[in-house]
Image (cartoon, grey):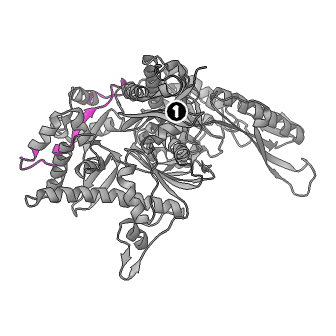
Amino acid sequence: MKEHFTIGIDTGGTYTDAVVVDAAKREILASAKSLTTHGNLSLGVIDALQQALGASDIRTQKEKNRKFDVSEIALVSLSTTLATNALVEGQGSSLVVFLLGFNDAMVERTEIAKAIPDAKIIRIDGGHVYTGKEQQALDTDAIREVLASDKGKADAYAVAGHYSVRNQAHEREAAELIKSITSAPVTASCDLSDSLNGPKRALTAGFNAQIVSLIVQLESAVREALHTLGIDAPIMIVKGDGSIARADSVMYTPIETILSGPAASVIGARYLTGEKDFLISDMGGTTTDVATVVDGWPALNEAGADVGGYRTLVKAIDMKTLGLGGDSEVEIDGLQHIQLLPNRALPLSMLAMRFPHIEEELATALTANSGMHSALQYLLLQSSIESSDFSEREQELLSVLNTEKPILFREAIVSAKDRSTLKRLISRGVVRMSGFTPSDAAHVLGMQSQWNTKAAFSACELLGRATGYVSNNNTAEKIQALAQKIHDAVVTKSTRLMIDQLAALSFSENDLLVNAVASGNPLIKDLNITFESRIPLVAVGGPAEIFYPNVGERLGQPVLIPRYSAVANAIGAAVGHVKSSCIIEVTLHEKQGFQIHAPDEVIHVESATRALDIAKEMAITAVSHDLITKGGEVQNKEDITVNIDRIEIPGMEGDAGLISAKITAECESHAS
């Protein structure tokens, strides 16, 4: 009898991880890490999979000398931080957002202009009122005019209608029209949330449309990698609530994968530690995410995930996300204060590993009398994205950067216009820029060694000389001291984040007591400050072993860093469950009877009891279908839980006083 194994893959901003898991026996058979190849994601996935499959000692399971058979791979599950990183860094497709029936105040409340500055916002007559009745006729001619004038200038579109959750007709019609004319991906807000908050639904739809191409590319890359390795298995993706679903079911709702990587890390940490109640911190290359786990599962933020300071309406684990990671760009201001910027830079030690000539160039730059800081800034073309949205100036700059090796910023960028052009290309994820990072500092301190340590030393000295931290006297000691200060800055910020999460508060940056503990100097005159957590502290992610032992020292208790912590996300993806939920509302009609607001129609029913019965059956049917679509299975109807939240007139019997009700059906299963 063949055994069945699951592959978990996590594609992050810096690394792609792969694990082979025997879920039935709760065994991790192998793990591997490979650099994420942004220009062609499949290369990093193939490399990680080949390493993991080559390292799997499956022979001990049955026959000592038998070879590994890829047909025994029953499932491939994927988690990713690409969507989260893109939103935090403001990357993604060029975008047009159509708002149907929105007034000026509603448009402003969407915050789209702030959150997605390059998005074009178009108001169109249409939309519905609270009951689902048409507010205005949909102005399809206006949509056609906009598409004709903007032909080829947008890569994606989003549509949000006033009260579309009460009646989806206008959103559906507008989306189909846009798709038929442009063939571009179109996001309808009603597919993402059942919230009545139209402005937030619009923002969520805009974010979703912005990152569709990223997830499409990722799914294609994984599928290509599996085909190359001869693996024929369904592909699942971890959603932001920690559940998994078939990749094709979330392909065009990628906003559901924001916090996918962190959600997978929570599931993986629970699996690795066996803890049920704990605080987890997941540090990657770009972000650090913290969450509290209660009774084995992270709490969900019903209001939606908050990423980059903006609230979405997609249900996700209740987690704080901060732009802090191993690849955060380090900047030193005029007062010699160390700043950890939220954007990700290419670590120079990693760049020099990939392009060995950079080691020599950094060393040579130390002999110059000027330009030391600019010697740290290389530009590297990351992707060969084809888009008609590139301007002539952008195409010119891309042609300059289209070489086999990185180019110094100062050699490629010669004017203010070049700078603004580069900024746009970086925001699109097409170009990356190098800089000194905490990962480079860790190489200087001997805490990491997988990349080019000599380049890290040269880069640290260049940064120190450019900012006055390092001089000709005691140079080696001062380089070490600067690297240690950068390391300590990461530890301090990470400690603060854990303190905030433990207290469920956001302490002021000037809070004297918190700063004393977080900085590692807890003595204020004759007062020694200590904080004590009542739950275990767990850290996972690639940089966890570098920074979190010191975080534990400052908080007065060890931080648990389990074996395989560096690939916890991939493990969480491999052991996840499929979940589904469906909400159907029943409301009192303005004249008589009740309205059932089903996904595809509004149904009028005279009796409250009849309306509730129909809504319940519709919710059960919808959740069963959705679970199967996502890759799960429903053994029987008893597996589905149904909750009815009622609003009614007090003192009336039965359903006579019903005003409205929300029927929620939920179900969970293993992947089928």
Query: Magenta-highlighted stretch: main secondary structure?
Result: loop
At a point 6% along the width and 47% down the height, the residue shown is 368
**Residue 327 in magenta stretch:** no
Nearest to the observer: residue 373 or residue 173: 373
Q: Quadrant of the C terminus?
A: top right
Q: Determine which residue is flagged by label 1.
A: 21
Q: Which span of residues is magenta-colored?
A: 365-393
> Is residue 460 visible from the viewing direction of this image?
yes
Q: Quadrant of the N terminus?
A: top right
Give the left or right position of residue 23, taking residue 627 as reference.
left
x and y percentages locating residue 158 in the rendered image: 53, 33
Q: Is residue 271 above or below residue 399?
A: below
Element under label 1?
A: strand
At a point 49% along the width and 22% down the height, the residue shown is 182
Label 1 amino acid?
A: Val
Label 1, residues with CA under 10 Å away: few <14, some 14-19, many ≥20:
many
Nearest to the observer: residue 534 or residue 332: 534
